[in-house]
Amino acid sequence: MATKDSLSEGPRHVALIMDGNGRWAQARGRPRLFGHHAGAKRVKEIVRACKPLGVKYMTIFAFSTENWKRTQSEVSGLMSLFRQYIRKEARGLKAEGVRVRFIGDRVRLDEKLVKLMNELEEMTAENDVVNLTIAINYGGRDEVARATKRLARDVANGTLSPDDVDEETLPRYLDTHVLPDPDLVIRTSGEARISNFLLWQSAYAEYEFIDTLWPDFTEEEFTRIVGSFGGRKRRFGAVPA
Ligand code: IPE
Ligand code: IPE
Ligand code: MG
């Protein structure tokens, strides 16, 4: 029988796969980018909901390493949306105590966007109310490959011994090295897959797949999901006493 103390506390780190913008727009006879703009507007409300729920870390998937396969107009529309978003929201995020970080490979992103990303990270570096991490040109496999490359360099230059490579060492080379692992991963839009998000980090995350399309996702639904997390029994491979 589940006793109260065998149940988990609220999630400290929630990761969100914000999916369904395109379908949301299509259902309204509008272009996909209209859905992306509507989706971007939802982020603020969800980030604001974190503090009262005790969610200290929130990581959101904005653009995957595979999303370059989309039409050039959708990709450039998204890149321009990211620039607009940072310009528009930077002050508010800073004022609300949100520390923003970005994960993903910046090499393929345009210079202007990278500059805005760096500035926002610096500008909010002293904040500590909520840690918001935005994944842009992020892929879990790409992240592990880039981490391995850096790790191999350290082995080659003698700062790391191959014998010291273990599951504590490798994540120090990941983009997420300063973040705790996600406790809960939520994906909207009815797809039950992780699409290359936080592969290493989500090994023991709880998953919640919901049908709501991202632009329809509300604080109420987020609160309900975070609340229901407390009823889950996380065993991490062990047999509970
Ligand atoms: C998620 O919405 C946002 C990004 C991947 C950038 P989609 O654009 O994937 O929307 P659907 O899945 O096509 O509806
Ligand atoms: C995952 O959604 C990526 C983001 C939400 C940014 P996709 O829509 O790209 O994933 P698939 O193609 O359905 O797996
Ligand atoms: Mg999608």
Image (cartoon, rainbow, N blue to C red):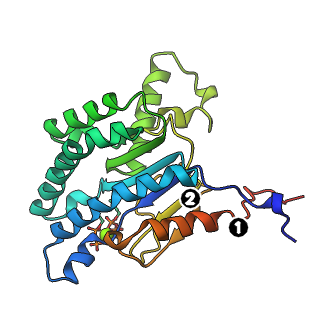
Amino acid identity at mark 2: Leu
* In this rendering, position of residue 208 left or right of residue 213: right
* Image coordinates for residue 53, horizontal then vertical, percent: 56, 55
Q: Residues within 10 Å of mark 2 (few under 14, many from 20)?
A: many
Foreground: 78 or 204? 78
Q: Residue furthest left?
A: 73
Which residue is under mark 2? 184
Which residue is under mark 1? 231
Q: Is disc 1 placed on a helix, strand or loop?
A: loop
Is ligand 2 less than 8 Å from the beta carbon at label 2?
no
Answer yes or no: is residue 30 visible. yes
* Image coordinates for residue 235, horizontal then vertical, percent: 75, 59
> Which image quadrant for residue 38?
bottom left
> Which image quadrant for residue 157?
top left
* Image coordinates for residue 176, horizontal then vertical, percent: 47, 40
Q: Is residue 130 above or below residue 186?
A: above
Q: Residues within 10 Å of mark 1 (few under 14, many from 20)?
A: some
Q: Which numbered disc flags the more N-terminal residue, 2 or 1?
A: 2
At horizontal 59% and vertical 54% (from top left) the residue drawn is 183
If the picture is divided into quarters, which one holds ligand 3?
Answer: bottom left
Q: Which quarter of the image is occupied by the C terminus? A: bottom right
At horizontal 40% and vertical 63% (from top left) the residue drawn is 195
